[in-house]
Amino acid sequence: MLVLMTMTACVFWIFYSHGSVETLSQENTEMMTMQMLESTTRSLELMTYNIRHGVGIDDQLNLERVIETIKGVDPDIVALNEVDHRMPRSRMQKQDEIIAEKLGYYVAYGYNINFGLKYGNALLTKYPIKSWTNHHLPSLERKITEPRGLIEAELDIDGQDVKVFITHLSLITEERPGQIDFIVGKLKEISKPAILMGDFNDCPSSEQMGKISAIMQDTAGQEEYNTFSTDRPEARIDYIFVSKDMAVGSSKTVPSDASDHLPVVAEISFNH
């Protein structure tokens, strides 16, 4: 209320300082005040989605279903897991490029397997990517496991720098603590607004997820929903976290049979 009263006073001051003694109508005053508020607040719709390289719950490859699922939401920033790039199992599709081109997004592809045939995570965004890198996450040396990564990108969102992190953690319980500690370390290095999304392969009540929740907001809040698997969701393992200077509007899953995971969507806002 104090902000609204202050901005309203500013609107009147602008008019009187220019020599006008005409009284503004309440409608015009409210309109101008809202325009000033909107100029300092940015709302975003976020999505995280493990796409299972385009294979749906029916075990059929159909990347178009993934594209239609994303298009139906039209999010501003998207985190994708299990994205193939020229893999035989997905008919040599460059899935990161196909999705980005069809939907008109900027893209950063962080592959964690590369034999010429690549597999990993992807960032899709409507906003320019100023810089990005793909960090390799720690793994247990005594086991041969799937390499995991963390995309770290900086976006220019209407003049505001925002950090976006995308990850997909190990299925092996013993590997996740080291991977979580690495991510927490990266988050503690930054002071600007931040977003962390992906498939963590862990439940909200675990000790490891508690380390993330201690420094970031889980956008699910008190909402109760599960993300895996699509036909019988029994666990929440896909998350959208945002820094504590952001406001969370809503968080939910989106119905889709395009993968074995349900996509998660969150609406957030922040001052810039």
Image (cartoon, rainbow, N blue to C red):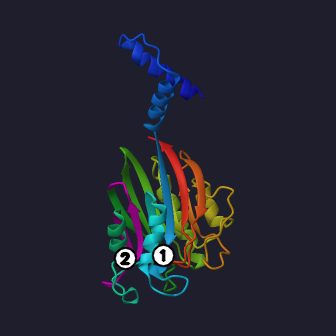
Is 169 situated above or below 186? Answer: below
Residue at x 54% of width, y 44% of height: 245
93 relative to 188 in the view: left or right: left
Q: Earlier in the sequence, mark 2 or mark 1?
A: 1
**In the image, residue 19 lies at what x, y percent?**
36, 10
- Indicate the amino acid at tag 1: Ile
Residue picked out by circle 1: 51
- Residue at point 33%, 78% (across, down): 94
Instruction: State which region is magenta.
Output: 106-129
- Residue 63: image location, x then y, percent: 42, 78
Q: Evaluate if marks 2 and 1 touch, with contact meaning CB atoms under 8 Å apart.
A: yes
Q: Mark 2 sits on what residue?
A: 95
Relative to residue 125, is residue 235 drawn left or right? right
Q: Residue furthest bottom?
A: 88
Amino acid type at image mark 2: Gln
Q: Is residue 214 above or below residue 3?
A: below
Magenta-colored stretch includes residue 180: no
Q: Quadrant of the N terminus?
A: top right
The image position of residue 29, as x and y in percent, is: 49, 24
> How many labels were placed on the picture?
2
Numbered tag placed on residue 34 in the rendering: none
Secondary structure mainly formed by the magenta segment: strand
Residue at 61% x, 75% y is 228
Label 1 neighbour load within 10 Å: few <14, some 14-19, many 20+: many
Q: Residue at x 65, y 55 (%)?
A: 221
Q: Quadrant of residue 205?
A: bottom right
Is disc 2 surrounded by few (<14), some (14 to 19) or many (20+) residues within 10 Å?
many
Residue 148 visible in the snapshot: no
Quadrant where the C terminus sits is top left
